[in-house]
Image (spheres, rainbow, N blue to C red):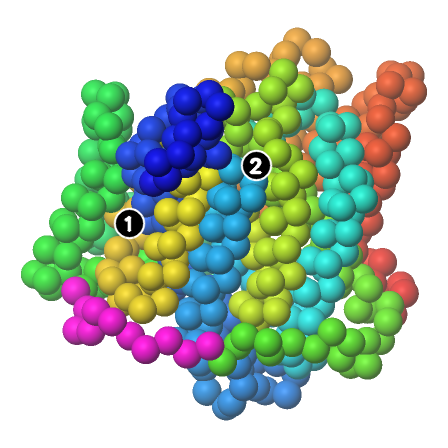
Amino acid sequence: MSSQTTAGGRSGLDGYFKITERGSTVATEIRGGIVTFFTMGYIVVLNPLILGYATDVDGKYLGGGSEPNLAAIAAGTALVAGVLTILMGVVANYPLALAAGLGLNAFVAFAIASQMTWADAMGLVVIEGVIILVLVLTGFRTAVFHAVPTSLKTAISVGIGLFIALIGFVDAGFVARIPDAANTTVPVQLGATGVLTGWPVVVFAFGMVLVIALWVRKIKGAILISIVVTTILALVVDALGADKGWSLNEPAFPDDVFDTPHFDTLGHFSLLGSFDSIGVVSTLLLIFTLMLADFFDTMGTMTAIGAEAGLLDEDGVPPNTERILVVDSIAAAAGGAGGVSSNTSYIESAAGVGEGARTGVASVVTGVLFLLTILIAPLVEMIPSEAAVPALVLVGFLMMQQVREIDWADLEIAIPAFLTIVLMPFTYSISVGIGAGFIAYVVIKLVVGKAAKVHPLLWLVAASFVIYFAIDPITRVLT
């Protein structure tokens, strides 16, 4: 820590990151950064599983070759996430971590790479990131954010809270999708068979009870303590051979703690190849789809994090908004250049905020841990999702509390807010919830004769989301 002090008398580190000003401490920031890493470190394991087993139009796997290259994808995932998360902390001073975006990576793997080579697909991600960066630098992205009514921003935060709680329950196996073959119209159920089965679910339930108990007792480090203790329980359960049905990774202690990194995916992209592969119109439509999802996911996420941390101003705007969006846009392009799909801000950062993180120091800690993961990936794989996701359920509750700030008696805002909130978990997509809410808001204002009160940018955004929702029929018509 620097021995120099700022004009206000605080040390250089404290002055730069405004630790004391935001009501935090270095220890709290470190703890929050660690918790954020533990709740989203799964992406180092999950991203390779999503990208690594998909083949491109030539039947090749990401990174080249005729066999999956999971180790290289994992190393690239950790590298890009680490560098960009540190950048977020240092440049934007915001407790927000970034990594390969879930949903976006699946779209790249199964909807884009199937039509072209992996290099061409990652080139599209780079182009999309550059376009969003231009929109930020010209002020357009920030202007759109300011045009959104405060109540809709609140609804976005609440919807994301429900969404990440659902993610937690699903990843733990507490909630499961009913197989397509089942003779029912019910989409989800309790457990895999309608009842809770298996020791992994017991481990999750233990973690859930523990984190709630610690939280209501106001124990510092409640989330981190619960993750560590629950991981130890998971290791014991697995060692006894009681159950092997873990959701993402088995919590067995690794044979090798350290691993030699390989970065075969880095630089594996082609900017213009897709235009030759599938034509200009199809390429532009794919870029538009990627861009719209990326454009609004981060706006919702940074608002939710700011609300939970108490960092928003009276208009619901986070500090250093433009810097946050610049780093996030660079992350999108960097993910494509790194060959690991678009990187975006993670709502799991709310877990660290729940532990008290309020500044970019937490992001720096999370980023450093991602970089260390390149060498010690086996240790990260040891933590099962069942031990980490109880934190997401708790944070979902914390974010849900903001719902009281919405005026439910005003139908002109209540209905769009409702659609925003429920469609995020129901469709498993932040962008869908935001889009439905924006469209509903504009339509209702038009119907009640208040169209003039709608910000011009919201008309443009709503129209863009109409195109987004209708992208499939539009693609069929134009191609």
Report x, y in % for residue 439: 78, 34
Most common secondary structure along the magenta stretch: loop
Residue at mark 2: 302
At 63% from the left and 26% from the top, the residue drawn is 317
Nearer to us of marks 2 and 1 is 2
Mark with earlier residue (2, 1): 2
At 47% from the left and 69% from the top, the residue drawn is 76
At 48% from the left and 46% from the top, the residue drawn is 97
Q: Secondary structure at mark 1?
A: helix
User: What amino acid type should be assigned to the residue bearing mark 1?
Assistant: Glu
> Which portion, as a residue range, is magenta?
253-263
Find residue 386 and name its label.
1
**Residue 391 visible in rendering:** no
Determine which quarter of the picture holds residue 301: top right
Q: Say whether residue 251 is magenta.
A: no
- Return the residue found at the far left: 240
403, above or below 372, in the image? above
Towards the viewer: 122 or 449: 122
